[in-house]
């Protein structure tokens, strides 16, 4: 199981995937908003999203788990 983590603190502005979606390495899965900037968070490997840990509007800290894929 691969975990996708936030690279910085911010609010989840947009969730681009849902559980069950297949993703490719480098694909954006969410967009964080921090200090009025939009920062995409992408996956480093191919797989299927098995669990989303965030919703739009949630606040995440650096290294919080955003999603899990297998």
Image (spheres, grey):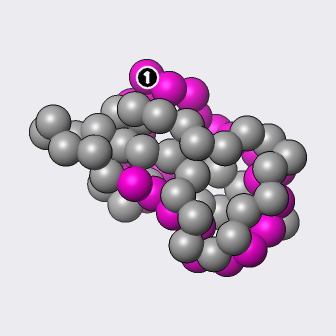
**Which is more toward the observer, 69 or 64?**
69
Q: On the rendered image, what quadrant is the N terminus found in?
A: bottom right
Is 35 positioned to the left or the right of 61 in the image? left
Q: Residue furthest left?
A: 35
Which of the 4 quarters of the picture holds residue 22?
bottom right
**Residue 37 magenta:** no
Q: Above or below — where is 32 with respect to 59? A: below
Residue 27 seen by the camera = yes
Segment colored magenta: 40-65
Q: Residue at image x 55%, y 37%?
A: 15
List x then y, in percent, for residue 18: 73, 39
List x then y, in percent, for residue 30: 50, 46
Q: Above or below — where is 38 with respect to 25? A: above
List x then y, in percent, for residue 55: 56, 28
Q: On the rendered image, what quadrant is the C terminus found in?
A: bottom right
Disc 1 crowd rating (10 Å Cα; few below 14, some 14-19, many 20+) is some
**Which is more toward the observer, 20 or 6?**
20
Is 51 positioned to the left or the right of 4 in the image? right
Which of the 4 quarters of the picture holds residue 12?
top left
Q: Residue at image x 58%, y 64%?
A: 27
Is 36 positioned to the left or the right of 67 in the image? left
Q: Residue at image x 36%, y 43%?
A: 32
Q: Residue at image x 42%, y 45%?
A: 31
Residue position marked by numbered label 1 in the rendering: 57
Residue 9 seen by the camera = no
Which of the 4 quarters of the picture holds residue 6?
bottom left
Q: Residue furthest top?
A: 57
Element type at marker 1?
A: loop
Is 58 positioned to the left or the right of 33 in the image? right
**Residue 58 magenta:** yes
């Amino acid at each position: 199981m691969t975990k996708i983590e936030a690279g910085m603190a911010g609010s989840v502005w947009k969730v681009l995937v849902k559980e069950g979606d297949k993703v490719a390495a480098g694909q954006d899965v969410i967009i964080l908003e921090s200090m009025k900037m939009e920062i995409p968070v992408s996956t480093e490997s191919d797989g299927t999203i098995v669990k989303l840990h965030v919703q739009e509007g949630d606040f995440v800290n650096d290294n919080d788990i955003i999603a899990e894929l297998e």
